[in-house]
Amino acid sequence: MASIPSKNVWIRRQQCPCGDWKCYVSYEGEGEETSIAAELVKSERVSSEAMVSPYVGMVFKSDTEAFEYYGNFARRNGFSIRKERSRLSPQLGVYKRDFVCYRSGFAPARKKPIGENHRDRKSVRCGCDAKMYLSKEVSEGVAQWFVVQFSNVHNHELLEDDQVRLLPAYRKIHEADQERILLLSKAGFPIHRIVKVLELEKGIHGGQLPFLERDVRNFVQNRKKIVQERDALLNEKREIDTIELLEACKATKESDEEFVYDFTVDANDRVEHVAWSYGDSVNAYDMFGDVVYFDTTYSSITYGLLLGVWLGIDNHGRTIFFGCVLLQDETPRSLAWAFQTFIRFMRGTFPQTILTDLDPGLRDAIRSELPGTKHIISRWNILSKISSWFSFYLGPRYAEFKSEFDLLYSVESSEDFEIRWDQMVSMFGIVSDKHLDLLFSFREYWVPLYIRGCLLAQMATSAYFKAVDMFLKGVFSAQTCLRSFFEQVGISANFQSHEHHEMQYLQLKTNIPIEEHARSILTPFAFNALQHELVLAMQYAASEMADGSYLMHHFKKIDGERFVMWIEDSEQIHCSCKEFESSGMLCRHALRIFIIKNYFQLPDKYYLSRWRRESSLALSDGHGIESNGGHWFHEYQRLTEALFAESSITKERSEHVRRELMKEITRLLNEIRRMPESDGVAAMDLTESPNG
């Protein structure tokens, strides 16, 4: 069984297979030292041909090896053994070992408690003299154990094979049986029923198990006691860790008044849930909180806490941290509190769209607490489930199933979807599968025909979810307690907020005026996406309809026809693919119409603020700057933004700015270093610089 670790991390259960094992014994005979190997089978019994009776002078490599050998000899001969005494010296450590028959010696007399009914249990000890004594010798740094006394004379009856197996020394419950017993006990089976089930599963008669019913009862009771003690220790450690986490939140709040956190306590006044966010995250949400991803894929094995992280995407395509919550459980009440707290942190602003994992509890909580928000489950979350659910079950047919499932993403009507779904289910014989039933019940959350036109802002892509996975792995890289986890979240969130992209030259591919104009307005991430659509727009033909709309079709017919409606007076354009409504950037079909209409630049309303250069977080999080006399930062940012925009127009400009800027910054830095460090006037406080 997997054990509970000493720190807050995330692990999997694993069990090692139980195999045969060997015991190597050395003995002296006829003047020379020889070695034999007695192979022990799982039942710990050996054949009479392989077993040699212990004798004075027999040699073992260790006292453990000797005890195992003598124990197997004892079992074959109808008794068991125990360790009696050992002697210790400063030079050799343990140098004497006494192993005796289980009935050796006599039980000490016990005083009966006065006034209590005491059960007088008869002792099995009868003074048996059967024994094997060993002594250790060290020669040239190598230790060996020699039998110095051996007696196999017993003063009691030795047991037959079907009786000796019931001695306490041999009544062992192997790991596989332990797992089964615990599983049946957890399911509510009484002890006698558990024993009966094990006998039936092994195909043996009653009483033939290698342990007794009372052994099973003792094992279950001891395990419950261990679990209770472990849970008590974990609860104590969790309470200490949680208090330290709240102390860290309080300290952060004192140093950053824009930091926000909240928590709840249970009926015993112990902390249940904790949530927090940062000033930079709240400000980022004001600009990029239209689409939010709520990730719940990680949980603490140590404490059983569920981690929820709210993330977004900025105009450079980077992952943004919005907030974090640790929940004691996933009940509707807990999830409802999480969403209520998040919206309160974000100043009461609801996202347009929220993406989550496939989970009925999350669906119900969003319906209740974010009624105006569109709930979507991305293709990335769906496909990860599909693989784990059906790859093993379908075996070699999984690839075929995956191809059929992918086709569901291209259907255009609900009727066609249901027809294809039924065909797929019938084709692979998985009519009553609970996972497929769940997927079908959630179809309005993940099938494109139902969610087309919902704002996703380039977040429902494999590239974005790979970035999210890297972000979360960074947070969980090395956690020892909740406080260190809190600190790592802060480090990762701060890094994401202040990460800057290197200046790059954006090469034109179509050389049409629309592309050149877009390059000066959009961030490189957004421009690359629009540029891709512009390149593909040249492959489409437009047929004007009687009502002024256009029917678009690809010259190779690689996709279906699209309808584009053009309203000239208000310069409005609408495409049936609804790419602009989904990503915030015009599609190839709409761009083709603007080209046909001889537009040199797109109307300003088709450049959403979330994708513009001036919407970068470095320009938006200037809180506290004015109060510190830092108004010059705004001028600095305005000039650098203009410099980067102008330099990206041509490769020659880009290289010139890079070269000259490095020289000028080096010159200015050297000049500043030659200036006095103090002039008697208080220096400007730059701690609130938006650039960190």
Image: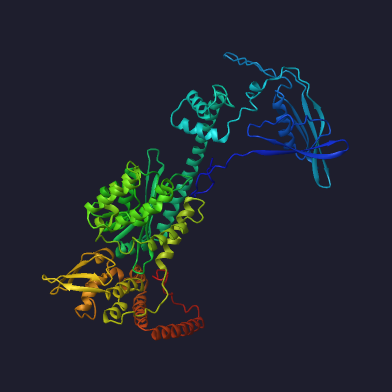
| Left or right: 536 as drawn, with respect to 671 | left
Corner quadrant of residue 348: bottom left
Instruction: Give the mark count.
Output: 0
Q: Nearer the viewer, residue 150 or 382?
A: 382
Position above or below: 3 against 311: above
Q: Position of residue 34 (x, y in %)?
A: 82, 40
Residue at x 38%, y 62% (from the top left corner): 464
Corner quadrant of residue 410: bottom left
Locate the N terminus by quadrant.
top right
Position above or below: 429 against 116: below
- Tell me if residue 349 can be seen: no
Position above or below: 522 against 281: below
- Tell me if residue 422 can be seen: yes
Q: Residue furthest right?
A: 31
Corner quadrant of residue 489: bottom left
Q: Residue furthest front?
A: 427
Q: Position of residue 457 (x, y in %)?
A: 30, 64
Q: Nearer the viewer, residue 98 or 154?
A: 154
| Left or right: 154 as drawn, with respect to 190 | right
Q: Position of residue 186 (x, y in %)?
A: 45, 32
Position above or below: 166 against 386: above
Q: How is the image coloured?
A: rainbow
Locate the C terminus by quadrant.
bottom left
| Left or right: 46 as drawn, with respect to 339 | right
Q: Nearer the viewer, residue 86 or 3?
A: 3
Q: Position of residue 322 (x, y in %)?
A: 36, 59
Residue at x 37%, y 76% (from the top left corner): 633
